[in-house]
Image: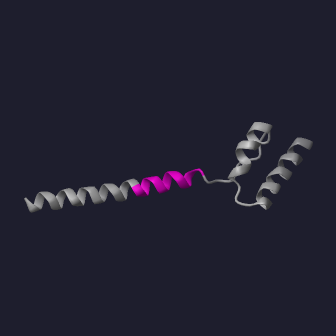
């Protein structure tokens, strides 16, 4: 009976570690810098992209790149 409980505990521990690692990997995948393109530089695209930046300097750099692309 003790072997059964011990095996269940080990299985659940492995499952918890697996789920945690998978969650971290999936969350970190979407953390890239948004690409400067016509979709992201449009009104709705910019509203979606700007909150993803960590600080105002990064936001301003993205806006400047969008403006330079629009001028070309």
User: Which quadrant of the structure image shows residue 43?
Assistant: top right
Outermost left residue = 1
* Residue 25 within the magenta-colored segment of the rendering: yes
| 51 to 38, vertically: above or below | below
Q: Position of residue 15 (x, y in %)?
A: 31, 54
Figure label count: 0
At x 77%, y 46%, the residue is 36
At x 19%, y 56%, the residue is 8
- From the viewer's perspective, is 42 left or right of 30? right
User: Which quadrant of the structure image shows residue 61?
Assistant: bottom right
- From the viewer's perspective, is 9 left or right of 43? left
Q: Position of residue 25 (x, y in %)?
A: 49, 55
Q: Position of residue 35 (x, y in %)?
A: 72, 47
Whether residue 72 is visible here, answered yes or no, is: no
Q: How is the image coloured?
A: one colour
At x 27%, y 56%, the residue is 12
The prevailing secondary structure element of the residues shown in magenta is helix
Q: Quadrant of the C terminus?
A: top right
Outermost right residue = 71
Q: Quadrant of the N terminus?
A: bottom left
Whether residue 71 is visible here, answered yes or no, is: yes
Q: Position of residue 68 (x, y in %)?
A: 89, 48
* Residue 16 within the magenta-colored segment of the rendering: no
At x 76%, y 43%, the residue is 46
- From the viewer's perspective, is 17 left or right of 12? right
What stretch of residues is rendered in magenta? 20-30
- From the viewer's perspective, is 18 left or right of 6? right
């Amino acid at each position: 009976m003790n072997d059964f409980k011990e095996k269940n505990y080990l299985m659940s521990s492995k499952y918890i570690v697996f789920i945690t690692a998978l969650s971290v990997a999936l969350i970190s995948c979407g953390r890239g810098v948004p690409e400067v393109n016509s979709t992201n530089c449009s009104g709705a695209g910019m509203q979606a992209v700007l909150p993803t930046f960590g600080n105002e300097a990064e936001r301003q750099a993205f806006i400047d790149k969008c403006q330079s692309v629009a001028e070309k």
